[in-house]
Amino acid sequence: MKLISRYTMMLLALLVLLTTVAPVASATGTTGDSSSKKLVLGTSADFAPYEFHKVIDGKDQIVGFDIAIAKEIAADLGAELVIEDMGFDGLLPALQSGRVDMVISGMTPTDERKKSIDFSDTYYKSKQVIMIRNTDKDKYPTMAELENEKIGVQKGSIQETIGQGIPGAKLTALDKISDIVLQLQTNRVNAAIVEDTVAAGYLDDIIGLAPAIPDEEQVEAAIGIRKGNTELLTAVNGTLERLKSENKIEQMVKEASQLNADKLDKNQNIFEVFWQYKSFYATGVGYTLLLSALGVIFGVIIGLIICLFRLHDVAILRWIGTAYVEVIRGTPMLVQLMIIYYGVSLTFGINFSALQAGIMTLSINSGAYLAEIFRAGVQGVDRGQLEAARSLGMGRTAAMRFIVLPQAFKAVLPAIGNEFVTIIKESSIISVIGMVDIMYQASVVKNITYQGMNPFLIAAAIYFVLTFILSKLLGRLERKLSASDRR
Ligand code: ARG
């Protein structure tokens, strides 16, 4: 009885912990109270001068003329603007599922997209261009030369569609424009399809424009609104009309382009990069630790339950336990994350924040591995131990608790430690849904600095330090527990 109430207390404490953590989630997510009106903007901030990251006063901020427009809309509505940064191809599902209220991301109102969302009036026009390395300047006079060529495009963009229309082209579709430029610089692709306004920010002595120009040259940008949300649509069009009549949009484009032009020193060494962006990494460490710690705690709970199931006398419970372990272990964590984050939301309308989805995925996933570790531990203890305890008059539960489990725990401690280290590293996968962990911040720093190596070396160093400290601590615990063996 006492034991049970202790576990209940522990569970309660966990619940309290989770609810106090939830507000942190809303800082990055969309959940929150309705006391002040919020307007949640979905954007893919890799598209300067439309939307991009910029360090201002030592703080990472999302700026650009799309953001300036969003601020005007929010002001007209008397709402607070909340920005959700995500991959371009995640924007439509985010809007449809209600995770965001509107999408401003240089998005072209295509017929295909109009099937699933509504669009405002257009607010900007640009042209498609082909970016190449300056050394290839004369290689691509017309689109015909791009046939069978290696071409970089942004995933989910209309440029991807254009690329698909080029006969024999080998497309590399990536999340971020900066990654595509990196691919071009490192000879992995030989051309990239982008919009002229965006290309302007990348042109330098290495990257230039080809004379070739795609057929569908004109591109427009409009604001995406969820179907049926006519109230917001009308408001958005109202604001756009006002901005156009005040000639504000051109001015915003100019200001954003200037902001993007004053680039930073590209030759910073790794220590300078670390020092300048230390606050980014610090935030990342906080979220990585939070994710991993809660992932471990819930993972252990799930693992214990599943282990009990697997060792149970009732066949159906054993079967459930086995099925859980096999299914979770047999599918990639990235797929599990997508199902929990997008699948559950689109199918059942339950929107988990990135933090909630991340913790669930990590604990569900590690629960399967931990269950196996626990089972190995229990089964590894000689049956004679249990029999001896029972013959001394101990009950089954007491024998388990005082004789078998302590030995089992000691035996599997190294394996558990391994799993904890794995969780810290694997938590980096959660960054793909916009969880601001170490990995995510490293990509942000990469996008800001245009450096491909240093931001990730720093991330690697940080992960290493974290896991190294953890394994040292676990090693110490192991020695302490094994002290009794040597006596
Ligand atoms: N205009 C293009 C499209 O709608 C590309 C937009 C990309 N936007 C971005 N924020 N990366 O597909």
Image (spheres, rainbow, N blue to C red):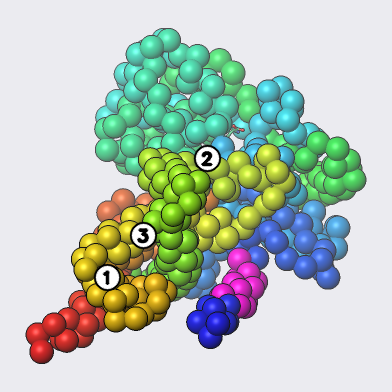
Q: CA distance from mark 1 to mark 3?
A: 26 Å
Q: Which residue, given by chain and number where applicable, does mark 2 sit on?
A: 198
Q: Magenta part of the protein: which range? A: 11-25
Q: Which residue is mark 1?
A: 387
Task: State how far apart marks 2 and 3 are (Cα).
Answer: 48 Å
Q: Is residue 184 visible?
A: yes
Q: Residue at x 53, y 43 (%)?
A: 338
Secondary structure that dominates the magenta span:
helix
> Toward the viewer: 371 or 57?
371
Distance between the alpha carbons at the discs numbered 2 and 1: 74 Å
Q: Nearer the viewer, residue 147 or 364?
A: 364
Q: Picture coordinates of residue 62 (x, y %)?
A: 58, 58
Q: Is disc 3 surrounded by few (<14), some (14 to 19) or many (20+) residues within 10 Å?
A: many
Residue 47 visible in the displayed image: no
Answer above or below: position of 48 versus 286. Answer: above
Q: Amino acid at mark 1?
A: Glu
